[in-house]
Structure formats: structure tokens, C-alpha cells
């Protein structure tokens, strides 16, 4: 049966936005590989991934994702999204930086690989420099 | 006829690696939109796009791309690649990011929309902070 890309993408993003870790994990294979390419962080398997998600939601209590575009095949999905949050805690993406209380909203791309309708690999690409600029920790680049 | 995403990605990156702007532009529609989310730059159409990449090749004389993955449909493609080179000059950013003569190698995701077998939109996602750390403009993240 063909992969229902629209359903997987929408439902998976809704799960991320619910901050319900078990709901999120239900979209991934047991041996899933998740990487945040911007931070340089890699998780292998559901245990590591669940720990990562729990920490992320503690550090980013209002983090949310808005789906902008998606497409794919039976084995691959590409996604563009906007990730927004308030910088209320020191986070992995801006390590050693005290919380500024400012909000950021950055565009990102996801590359997903699928096995039997579940995500076996997810790689997230976004620009931390944009986040640092938005929370006032880095000068904006001249146009 | 279905587009072979892997072949197209490899052929296109070969054109980019040749630094031959005309060869590169054969893969794009006349009205293409090219955006670099790392730099926050958007270029519209052939003139802006080719001027931009000529400047890029002047600033990064040895810049090259290595395709790591590619997939898609006739209308959309997603690619991952490694972009590497030496930051020799700083024309593109008007010295906002000074050229240190250091090398970089960063992971990038490209999201493409296609029209009649050519790219009508390319959006390139990567972490500018990683680039700035590698060329030693920004302190490295603690591991």
C-alpha cells in the first residue's frame, strides 16, 4: 500500500505539538535514528530519543512546529516547517547562554526515511545563527 | 516520464562543482527562486541567481558539493549534501563575515520545487553557526 504522506506528516507534527512523547514515538521505528544537524546531536533508538524529547519539552515549554510544505515517496519524506518558542531556559541549541525570555521563529527542513510506514531516520536542518539573532545574542547580517 | 531524483541531483551537483554558471543554470527555470536560509538571502530569476553564484565562486574558489541523499517526485525533490571549501574573500557579505582563509565542511538540506523537469525553487537549509565556528569567527560549542 502506498504511504499516505499527507496523513503521516500531519499526524506526526500534531504529535510533536502535543508534547506527548509516547504519541510522538508511535510514528518511529524501535531502532529510529534522530539527529539535530544544527546542534550536532544524534539519538539512536526509542530510549535515547524519548530522553531527548523529554528534555526538549522541559527546556522549551512552548515550542511548536508549523508545517509549511511536505512531499515524498514510499521511503522518503521532505518537510519544511517553522519552529517557534520562547527562550525560557538554557537549551542545547544555544548552550551556555542564559535564557533571554525572547521568542524565536526559524525555518527548518526535515529529511525522513521510512520503513513500513514508520520513520526510521529523521534529520533536522535549521539555522541556529538566526535564533541567536532573533533573541538578540548575535548582530543581524546586513542585507 | 518520471524524473530520476538521484541522477538529477548528481548531475546538478556536478555542474555546481564545475563552477560553470551557465551549466548550473540549465537545471533551473528562468524565473527560479533561490534562497539560502543560512545567509537569509533570496534571489529571483536568472540574473540575480547567476550574479550571486559568481560572487560565491569568487569568495569560495574551491567550494564543492557532495550529494549524500536524493529523493522526490516530478514536482518536488529533497537532497542532503556536504558543502565544503575555503572562505577566501568576503564580497558576498560585504565583510560582515570576514574571510579568515579557513576551511569549512557543513551538512546541508535542499528542498526543491520543479516545473517541467527544472528547478523553479531551491531552498537551502544549514546552520550558519557551524560555518562561523569552523572558520573560527565564533567560539565552538562545548561537546
Image (cartoon, coloured by chain):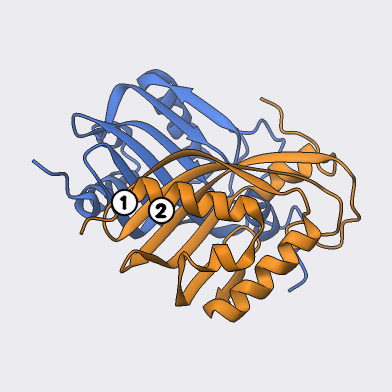
Q: Residue at x 60, y 73 (%)?
A: A49
Q: Are marks 1 and 2 in contact (CB under 8 Å)?
A: yes
Please state which of residues B34 and A6 is positioned toward the viewer in this rendering.
A6
Q: Residue at x 78, y 53 (%)?
A: A61
The image shows residue B41 at horizontal and vertical percentages of: 56, 30
| Subunit ID for the residue under disc 2 | A
The image shows residue A141 at horizontal and vertical percentages of: 71, 33
Report which colour depicts chain A. Answer: orange
Task: Specify few, some or many for label 2: CA neighbours under 10 Å numbering under 14, 14-19, or 20 or more.
Answer: some
Image quadrant where residue B70 sits? bottom left
Taking the image as shown, residue A17 lies to the left or right of residue B72, namely right
Establish if B136 lies above or below A28.
Answer: above
Image quadrant where residue A105 sits? top right
> Are labels 1 and 2 on one chain?
yes
Viewport quadrant of the C terminus of chain B: bottom right
Establish if B32 lies above or below B102.
Answer: above
| Subunit ID for the residue under disc 1 | A
Q: Residue at x 19, y 34 (%)?
A: B117
Q: Which residue is mark 1?
A: A4
The image shows residue A40 at horizontal and vertical percentages of: 62, 66
Label disc, if present, on residue A142 of the rendered structure:
none
Please state which of residues B121 and B18 is positioned toward the viewer in this rendering.
B121
Say whether residue A70 is visible.
yes
Which lettered chain is shown in blue?
A: B
Q: Which residue is mark 2?
A: A8
Taking the image as shown, residue A121 lies to the left or right of residue B22, namely right
For marks 1 and 2, give the CA distance: 6 Å
Say whether residue B139 is visible.
no
Viewport quadrant of the N terminus of chain B: top left
The image shows residue A84 at horizontal and vertical percentages of: 69, 42
Under tag 1, what secondary structure?
Answer: loop
Taking the image as shown, residue A13 lies to the left or right of residue A84, namely left
Amino acid at each position: 500500500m502506498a504511504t499516505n504522506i499527507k496523513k503521516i506528516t500531519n499526524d506526526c507534527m500534531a504529535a510533536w505539538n502535543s508534547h506527548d512523547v509516547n504519541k510522538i514515538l508511535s510514528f518511529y521505528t524501535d531502532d529510529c535514528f534522530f539527529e539535530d544537524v544544527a546542534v550536532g546531536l544524534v539519538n539512536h533508538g526509542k530510549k535515547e530519543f524519548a530522553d531527548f524529547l523529554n528534555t526538549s519539552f522541559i527546556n522549551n515549554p512552548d515550542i511548536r512546529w508549523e508545517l509549511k510544505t511536505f512531499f515524498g515517496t514510499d521511503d522518503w519524506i521532505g518537510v519544511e516547517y517553522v519552529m517557534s518558542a520562547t527562550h525560557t531556559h538554557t537549551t542545547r541549541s544555544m548552550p551556555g547562554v542564559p535564557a533571554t525570555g525572547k521568542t524565536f521563529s526559524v525555518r527548518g527542513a526535515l529529511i525522513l526515511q521510512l520503513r513500513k510506514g514508520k520513520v526510521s531516520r529523521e534529520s533536522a536542518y535549521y539555522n541556529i545563527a538566526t535564533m541567536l539573532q532573533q533573541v538578540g545574542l548575535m548582530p543581524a547580517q546586513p542585507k | 516520464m518520471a524524473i530520476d531524483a538521484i541522477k538529477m541531483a548528481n548531475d546538478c551537483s556536478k555542474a555546481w562543482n564545475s563552477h560553470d554558471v551557465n551549466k548550473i543554470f540549465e537545471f533551473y527555470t528562468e524565473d527560479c527562486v533561490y534562497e539560502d536560509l543560512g545567509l537569509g538571502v533570496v534571489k529571483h530569476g536568472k540574473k540575480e541567481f547567476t550574479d550571486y553564484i559568481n560572487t560565491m565562486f569568487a569568495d569560495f574558489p574551491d567550494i564543492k558539493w557532495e550529494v549524500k541523499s536524493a529523493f522526490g517526485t516530478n514536482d518536488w525533490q529533497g537532497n542532503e549534501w556536504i558543502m565544503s571549501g575555503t572562505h577566501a574573500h568576503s564580497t558576498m557579505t560585504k565583510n560582515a563575515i570576514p574571510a579568515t582563509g579557513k576551511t569549512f565542511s557543513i551538512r546541508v538540506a535542499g528542498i526543491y520545487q520543479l516545473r517541467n523537469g527544472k528547478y523553479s525553487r531551491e531552498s537551502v537549509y544549514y546552520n550558519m553557526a557551524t560555518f562561523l565556528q569552523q572558520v573560527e569567527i565564533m567560539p565552538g560549542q562545548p561537546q
